[in-house]
Amino acid sequence: MKQHAAPVEQLVGRLAGEVAVEALKAGDTRARFLERYPAEWRHRFGKEMAQSYRIKELLQAFDDNSWNCSAALLAHLDTKSLTAKEILLAVLKDDPGLLLELRHLLVRNPA
């Protein structure tokens, strides 16, 4: 049986609670102290969230024909237990030509 990590909502809620407790213990609830939360959030989850956003953009870019071609593959997968990344990889493995259609989304914009 596949073990699932705690939902992100639970993890960020715990992080917010930890920062709030630290602030109360330090007697400092000013915005400057509480800025630790978004900084720590970005440190812990920023890369994963950026990757998830890119995967979502790739999946949304599929046209109806691409999804129709992949429907047979998806019908045999337990999509309820798969992540969006695993579904995307399965679809691209089944139809590597989609990479060419989606290449403009795969190139990172220079920061």
Image: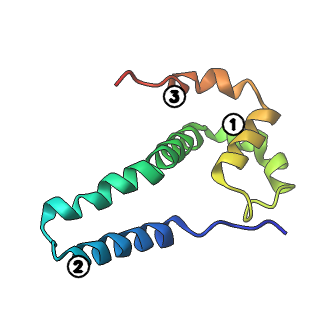
Q: Quickly name the residue at label 2.
A: 24
Residue 7, how many percent across, how many down? 56, 68
Q: Residues within 10 Å of mark 3 (few under 14, many from 20)?
A: some
Helix, strand, or loop for circle 3? Answer: helix
Q: For mark 1, give the secondary structure.
A: helix
Q: Amino acid at mark 2?
A: Leu
Q: Amino acid at mark 1?
A: Ser
Q: Residue 2 at what x, y percent from top left?
A: 80, 65
Task: Give the CA distance from mark 2 to mark 3.
Answer: 44 Å
Residue drawn 87% across the image and 55% down it: 76
Q: Toward the viewer: 82 or 48? A: 48
- Sequence-earlier tag: 2 or 3: 2
Q: Position of residue 40 (x, y in %)?
A: 37, 55
Q: Is residue 85 left or right of residue 81?
A: left
Apparent side of residue 28 relative to residue 78 in the rendered image (left or right) = left
Q: Quadrant of the N terminus?
A: bottom right
Q: Where's residue 15, x and y in %? A: 40, 68
Query: In this figure, which residue is indicated by the disc labeled 3?
Result: 105
Judging depth in this view, the residue of 104 and 111 nearest the camera is: 111
What is the residue that sits farthest to the front in this orientation? Answer: 26
**86 vs 100: above or below:** below
Is there a contact, CB below 8 Å, between mark 3 and mark 1? no
Q: Taking 4 as reference, is 25 left or right?
A: left
Give the residue at x 75% y 59%.
79
C-alpha gap between disc 3 and disc 1: 16 Å
Q: Quick check: marks 2 and 1 in contact, CB under 8 Å?
A: no
Could you tell me how far apart the alpha carbons at marks 2 and 1 are, in whole angstroms?
53 Å
- Where 22 sits versus 48, above or below? below
